[in-house]
Amino acid sequence: MDGPDPQEDSFRHGDGSDSRPTRDEGDQDHALPRNTSPANQRTAIKLPNGHVSCMCDARDPSPQCSGEVVVNGELLSVAESSAAPSTSSLLCASRPQSGHVSPQDDEDEPRGRRSSSSSSEAVDRTRESETASNDCLSEAEPCSSRTLSSPEDSESCSDPAFMDVSLCSRNTYEISRRQSAPDNVAEPAEPDLRQKKHGISEIFGRGLFSRKQKESASAPGWKLFGKVPLRESPPKDSKTIQQESNPGNLTSVSTPNLLSAGEYEAKTVKGAHSPSQPSQGRRKNLEFEPLSTTALILEDRPANLPAKPEEEAQRHRQEYDEMVAEAKRRELKEAQKKKQQMKERFKQEDSIVNAMVVWNTEVLPNWDSMRSTRRVKDLWWQGLPPNVRGKVWSLAIGNELNITPELYEIFLSRAKERWRSFRETGSEAEAEADSGASLADRESSLDLIKLDISRTFPSLFIFQKGGPYHDLLHSVLGAYTCYRPDVGYVQGMSFIAAVLILNLEEADAFIAFANLLNKPCQMAFFRVDHELMLKYFSVFEVFFEENLPRMFSHFQSSNLTPDLYLIDWIFTLYSKSLPLDVACRVWDVFCRDGEEFLFRTALGILRLYEDVLVHMDFIHMAQFLTRLPEHVSAERLFSSIYSIHMTSSNRKWPQVFSALMKDKESDKSGSPTLKSS
Amino acid sequence: MAYAYLFKYIIIGDTGVGKSCLLLQFTDKRFQPVHDLTIGVEFGARMITIDGKQIKLQIWDTAGQESFRSITRSYYRGAAGALLVYDITRRDTFNHLTTWLEDARQHSNSNMVIMLIGNKSDLESRREVKKEEGEAFAREHGLIFMETSAKTASNVEEAFINTAKEIYEKIQEGVFDINNEANGIKIGPQHAATNSTLSGGQGGQQAGGGCC
């Protein structure tokens, strides 16, 4: 009874991503593409009424399911403008009674039906209505079509119309119908119904519409759907299976909002009154309610269908209950999770607002006296509110170099001059080809900056050519190379400048940039002072061994030296390896504590992943550390960093560092791999 | 997975020539039009089969900027193969080959196999370096040569695998002392136990942990 029937499948040509028939297909009736993919069957779930329905979750729609949705034509969907959380929407409309459908009808659905004498009129109407619905639905369309073609997108598809899709598998259902009512041939032409449905079919692909036509005849026996305006009965009742049949009254679900733009006031199925009117307020109540569950309705089998054997009905009922229970569990879980997340977010937002007030009204006005107080330091550790972040960074970094905005302008115009002359002579130099003289210059030049800017936070799409911050980043870096030609542009700088640009005005960003790079640790790295870098790594190793002895010896025995991962981390101040928001928090405390915090962060990261790392070999550790997991929770990282103590035999970072510097002459051993050669 | 040998590779060449993209294409079979900047060094690994033997490639992908040369130099140590990459659409990257080669020769094992790669062969219309020039350079310096496209994956497999074949042949010929890890070759844990001809003693040959 539920084997796939290839012919039936022809209805589904609109399923799936591949074929989306164009709407001007003159005779859809006859030229329906056939998609006989058996995959269509896969998502089908057998429902209690003996039909198979596609259970689909809007969160996880599969193309097949999306296609099915339309099938029933009566779209049960309600499009409300409130951003509907993605919900599962299940609908299974059982085929109406038999009365009118002939086997032939079933087999040949689109064609047979349409070609039947009564259908020609219907076709015309259909077209009309299709046109009408196009207008109404034009907005929904892009979204839904996208969804059809790529299921993963559905979540991002905010068009509620789509979320509320009803799903129904027609296939087996048709078959069963055929079996149960082989002799009925009459076909009702129900133009009004058709109209209603077409609007929906537009969403999913026009080809489906023929199917809908047929559907129109159906009085669904039961359905599952979410967010459908069926809310006359309280959610709990919706689960119940009603035993008595009410053939006339089956459900149509109107789709008022989906079609709201147009005249399609979603209508009810043949004269039956809709059991449900969409209630506008309803959605609000659903916020944390399990949606599909409450919307799941099992209605009875229409009286004019042959009765199900008691046993089967029983089984179906049980299956149905299980499905409901499962769906409910899942949704409850989701809802709880969401609630938790929202709660956390609100809490976070609150604390950000509070912190912002404190920073703005108390700390910033009294910077010098407050900055070192315990309270401010604690507040600082929590992370700076984004809108004071730039200010605090600027103040904390300071301006030892006494750079003024005017000075920045001077260097910037110098840089622009250089670019201009570079561009002009660039081609000549090229023509002179292999002279080789200019090559070294060129690399360190602005040309390289250009190349690197597009490779700076490429995923943000704001620094790339044409992006809003492209020129800004170019300017800051260019001005710096003119300001410090002895350092020039070194890879990694673009990340630091980019983070500053995101938090500060242009000139302030430059000032902070120049002063930041002027700090001893940054200077050592950006000048690639090998000896000095080795010292930093050695000091790091002292604290590494102190804090994480087990991992330290594992790293040592694997020959994994700190330079392999620290270089990237220190050069970019973690902005390349950690998510940007987490990196900014590292910057916050780096501004508070100075260079040692960079190394403390490194130890915090190692500690955070200790359990994974100690079971890896060299190459896996190296790969892991040079490409950290994409999702790093700031909270977890900071609590890990918190437990790293930067003392070794009562010496703090600066003491250890200067002690090592003193050894410099006597002892030349450093990190094994980085021995300069 | 167990392997017979582990070869360390290093990828070198000017910045922006596509070193990281070649590696990504080789290890993940995908292309990222805008790749992150490499700072310091990044890593890749893949298992290949040569002559019926499983060989694990451990690939070090280095930063290309001149300023990082001193850092890159320390990574040659222990490399059995090097991919020296230039960009066929940027002549300066070809012109820099000599200095790269000097560095490589000076800081690596003398037996290190070097594969010269002209990358971005898909950008024919922007070509600035003729294929013949690459071939001539390779011939002159005793390198293997290939033009590749990390974007279309053309010749990428071949570049990595041919290098490994060359190394493997050198092992067979006894050129490499595989007991000296400084040669960039390690014997796999399994192989070490059974291989009597090539490895005399196996002390300290615990190859990279043995897990793939």
Image (cartoon, rainbow, N blue to C red):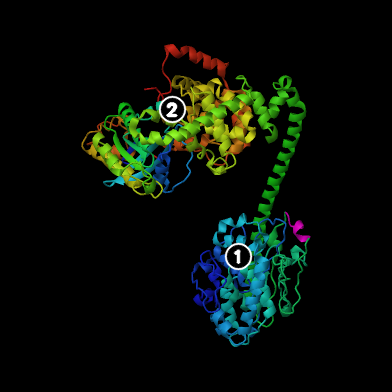
User: Tag 1, which secondary structure?
Assistant: loop
Residue A283 on the magenta span: yes
10 Å crowding of disc 1: few (<14), some (14-19), many (20+): many
Residue B28 position, x and y percent, is 42, 47
Q: What is the span of residues highlighted in magenta in the rendered image?
A: A281-287
Q: Viewer-proximal residue, A258 or A176?
A: A258
- The mark found on residue B67 in the picture is 2
* Quadrant of the rendered image containing residue A644: top right
User: Quick check: A514 above or below B20?
Assistant: above
* Quadrant of the rendered image containing residue A583: top right
- Amino acid under label 2? Ser
Q: Separation of disc 2 and disc 1 at Cα? A: 59 Å
Number of the front mark, 2 or 1? 2
Q: Residue at x 74, y 36 (%)?
A: A353
User: Tag 2, which secondary structure?
Assistant: helix
In which quadrant will I find the N terminus of chain A? bottom right
Q: Answer whether residue A325 is visible to the viewer in this image.
A: yes
Question: Tag 1, which chain?
Answer: A
The answer to whether marks 2 and 1 sit on the same chain is no
User: Which residue is identified by label 1?
Assistant: A55
Q: Viewer-proximal residue, A362 or A101?
A: A362
* Quadrant of the rendered image containing residue A265: bottom right
Q: Viewer-proximal residue, B54 or A244?
A: B54
Q: Residue at x 37, y 46 (%)?
A: B149
User: Quick check: B201 above or below B32?
Assistant: above
In which quadrant will I find the C terminus of chain A? top left
Residue A171 position, x and y percent, is 56, 74
Question: Tag 2, which chain?
Answer: B
Residue A173 position, x and y percent, is 59, 75
Residue A183 on the magenta span: no
- Amino acid under label 1? Met
